[in-house]
Amino acid sequence: MNYENLLISIEENIATITINRPTKLNALNKATISDLSKAIKLLGKNDDIRVIILTGSGEKAFVAGADISEFANYTIVEGAQLAAEGQELLFDMIEGLKKPVIAAINGFALGGGLELAMACHFRIASDNAKMGLPEVTLGLIPGYGGTQRLPQLVGKGRAMEMIMTAAMITAEQAKDYGLVNHVIPQEELLSFTNVIAQKIIKNAPFAIGKAIKAINANFTDGKNGFDVEIKSFGKCFGTADFKEGTTAFLEKRKAEFTGK
């Protein structure tokens, strides 16, 4: 499938999605959110894809925010609907996907762009990247999950400061805060991210999906993460991957997982 604002490449069970609106610094508009939702859902259903990498085109921006021109004249109802639809269509969907989604942040990740990166399962940044949630400078607050996911990642106090000051932080600060896992020279960002993805695809896909579910449960209201872990742990015993993994271990060979 062709997408207006995305480039997709697939190699060795790894799909790389590049948001491609360079003249707009890859800003998120409705069309791009729709494209991302469709693409990630399709890749999520493809058994040959084990990991998805999300990045931006060019050397300046991952995603430099939302496309403000689209909602500058919205009413209260329209604004709430914009946030609700975006969260359901894309951000929550990414967070709950059973396949790992890694954000390779190659430049500015601001507003909706940082929220998109935070919805991914973890983040790797180039050394020139800068991150922030500047919505209060527009008379808004983050609407795509930023007020919820940022405190989970960096702590309440730092999230309060970042959101209320609208300040940008550097990649190194983001690493110190726990917002990103690694900071890499820009020219090495995708190759480094691919190395991590290669490590992931060697492991059992079903188990990875259950691990994502169990970890997310700890951050979901009304969920008991320990209960979800117990049930997910038990379900792994009924898979071909469990049988293959344990047999390979006992036979002292590398396991060949199928995701079943």
Image (cartoon, rainbow, N blue to C red):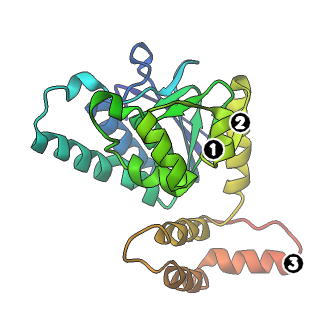
Residue at the spot 55% in from the left edge and 55% down from the top edge = 155
Q: Are marks 1 and 3 in contact (CB under 8 Å)?
A: no
SS type, badge 2: strand
Residue holding disc 1: 180
Residue at the spot 41% in from the left edge and 39% down from the top edge = 164
Residue at the spot 43% in from the left edge and 40% down from the top edge = 163
Between 116 and 174, the one lying in front of the other is 174
Label located before the other in sequence (2 or 3): 2
Q: Are marks 2 and 1 in contact (CB under 8 Å)?
A: yes
- Above or below, 218 relative to 162: below
- Above or below, 137 relative to 244: above
Between 194 and 138, the one lying in front of the other is 138
How far from the left and from the top, in percent, is residue 57?
A: 52, 22
SS type, badge 1: loop
Depth check, mark 1 against mark 3: the one in front is 1
Between 132 and 29, the one lying in front of the other is 132
SS type, badge 3: loop
Residue holding disc 2: 183
Residues packed near mark 2 inside 10 Å, few (<14), some (14 to 19) or many (20 plus): many
Q: Is residue 100 visible?
A: no
Q: CA distance from mark 2 to mark 3?
A: 38 Å
Dot 1 amino acid type: Val
Residue holding disc 3: 251
Between 63 and 243, the one lying in front of the other is 63
**Where is the C terminus found, in terms of image quarters?**
bottom right
Residues packed near mark 3 inside 10 Å, few (<14), some (14 to 19) or many (20 plus): few
